[in-house]
Amino acid sequence: MEIAHAGPMIRPFHKRGRPVAVIHYQSEQAARQFLQSVMASNRGVGFLFGPDGSGKKTVIRDFVRQLPANHAAAIVDGERLNAAELLAAIHSWFGRTVVPDTPEASLQALERYLAQQSHYGRVPLISVENINKMYPSALGVLCKIAKLKVGRVFAARMVLDSENPTFNIINAPAMKPIAARLLSAFEMGPMSVFETVDYLHAKLKAAGVKNPNHAMPAYICDELYL
């Protein structure tokens, strides 16, 4: 049976916007535990990597949605961003619409905001995707943010991600403030064949397909997995 004839539905596998459903599987659960460990540690910098479509963005966004409402978090796609653009994007996520017009002043304003939040025990999370596609000036800003402290507490937790294990970037001499705080790295693993069937059927059901097993039988899921 063709999926198009399975009943009224929305796109189950779109890449933009909130997913129709978040499906839990072994690697995704492990990634959540990894993110929790980053949030719990004062070192608090983690590196998440995996190929396009491996679930990195989904797990990070869902993790952020489950933080307390008053806990500031920013999720920025770093591709082709320079220093000023990166800072503006972070401020925007924090709900700060008036941003100084120079990177230096913008960084100072961000430092004050992070210090304020950290003072009340709500150390903000800054997640930056595609760090391997950022301009050097933006990477430099990440290093400056990584060094910010309130007393002995670092003023921000950070999760960096890329499609490849770009340790050559993180371990570069200029990235020492990031490397010094790196708690660990996590690679998104593939689903098992059984998880793949559950994933596809759950997505189809959430999108409006009444009988996912009829629309996409297990043997077809197995073929897609292979």
Image (cartoon, rainbow, N blue to C red):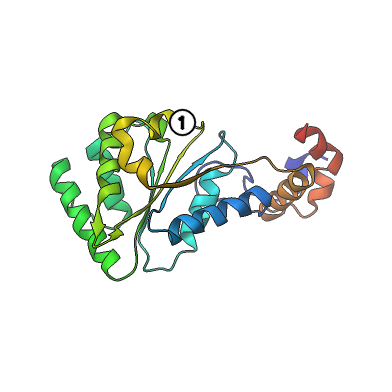
Q: Classify mark 1: helix, strand or loop.
A: loop
Indicate the quadrant containing the N terminus: top left, top right, bottom left or bottom right: top right
Q: Residue at x 31, y 31 (%)?
A: 173
Q: Give the side of residue 177 with respect to residue 39, left or right.
A: left
* Residue pictured at 23% horizontal, 65% vertical: 116
Residue nearer the viewer, 75 or 146: 146
Q: Quadrant of the C terminus?
A: top right
Q: Considering only vertical position in the picture, is 153 above or below 182?
A: below
- Amino acid type assigned to the residue bearing label 1 in the image: Thr
Q: Is residue 116 above or below residue 6?
A: below
Measuring 51% from the left and 33% from the top, which residue is drawn there? 163
Which image quarter: residue 167?
A: top left
Q: x and y percent of residue 221 in the render?
A: 79, 39
Q: Residues within 10 Å of mark 1 (few under 14, many from 20)?
A: some
Q: Quadrant of residue 132?
A: top left
Mark 1, residue position: 166
Residue 149: tell me if it is visible.
yes
Q: Position of residue 77 (x, y in %)?
A: 39, 40
Horizontally, residue 73 falls left or right of residue 191, namely left
How many numbered markers are drawn? 1
Comparing 202 with 38, the one in front is: 38
Residue 21 shows in this picture: no
- Residue 200 locus on image (x, y percent): 72, 46
Q: Residue at x 64, y 46 (%)?
A: 12
The x, y position of residue 102, in whole percent, is 13, 41
Q: Which one is nearer the viewer's eye here, 215 or 191? A: 191
Q: Residue furthest bottom?
A: 120
